[in-house]
Image (cartoon, rainbow, N blue to C red):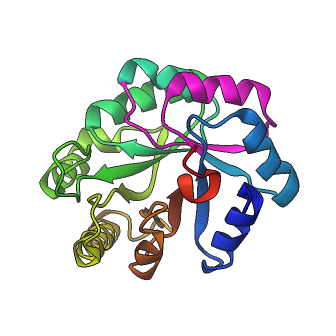
Amino acid sequence: MNLVDRLNEIRNTLPSNVKIVAVSKTKPAASIEILYREIGQRIFGENRVLELESKYKILPTDIDWHFIGHLQTNKVKNIVPFVKLVHSVDSLKLLIEINKEGIKINRCIPCLLQFHIAAEETKYGFSNDEVFRMLDDNLFHELSNISVKGVMGMATYTEDQHQIRTEFKTLFSIFNSIKSRYFAREPNFCEVSMGMSNDYQLAVEEGSTIVRIGSGIFGND
């Protein structure tokens, strides 16, 4: 099965409201272009700034580039001019930097708040308490050039589906809590980015609106 068939197969299993980020990290631009040209895939995800920049420069300008990796503050300025969504905002410091660079180019940058929901310590992300403190801080409300669209999280890499489902339930509960407390009047706060190639179906069952799929589309090469 080629990558077009794999993506089509995944699309056919998803509700119409769920968006697929084709995670193209380490994959050649030619593979991205095949999905773009042949079946109209427009959303692609990268986790390294330099690789994202290089692909942005040579691929069609109407691709929606999502940044899904850990973002260092000194690299923010490289992607702010064009990135469609930053999934991995995990600190107020990073939000402040994104806002600062957004002001420079008069652009409001869409972001998701990344939560640490997995058992693995190596995963990045806010805790509940950290986010509530941030959202209660006047400094957050002064950030005029960021737009928080929702939340993101990564489940533990395990075969225990009960654990994965529990972690996804946790993220969706966090989303609802934040939505009702801080964004009740903001319809654009509506995204829950969770689920990857090995667990996206569980994620969708638990409320995901964006799935990030790499090997399920591109293979493991």
- Residue 103 visible to the viewer: no
Q: Quadrant of the C terminus?
A: top right
The magenta region covers 45-72
- Residue 54 visible to the viewer: yes
- The quadrant holding residue 124 is top left
In the displayed structure image, the side of residue 108 where residue 201 appears, left or right: left
Tell me, yes or no, whether the highlighted magenta stretch contains residue 71.
Answer: yes
Question: Against 53, is 43 above or below?
Answer: below
- The quadrant holding residue 21 is bottom right
Residue at image position (52%, 63%) is 210
Q: Nearer the viewer, residue 8 or 41?
A: 8
In the displayed structure image, the side of residue 75 where residue 121 appears, left or right: left
In the displayed structure image, the side of residue 13 where residue 178 appears, left or right: left
Residue at image position (73%, 52%) is 42
Percent x, y of residue 98: 44, 31
Residue at image position (39%, 44%) is 88
Q: Quadrant of the N terminus?
A: bottom right
Percent x, y of residue 154: 33, 56
Q: Nearer the viewer, residue 87 or 118?
A: 118
In the displayed structure image, the side of residue 55 where residue 109 appears, left or right: left
Residue at image position (41%, 76%) is 202
Question: Against 38, is 163 above or below?
Answer: below
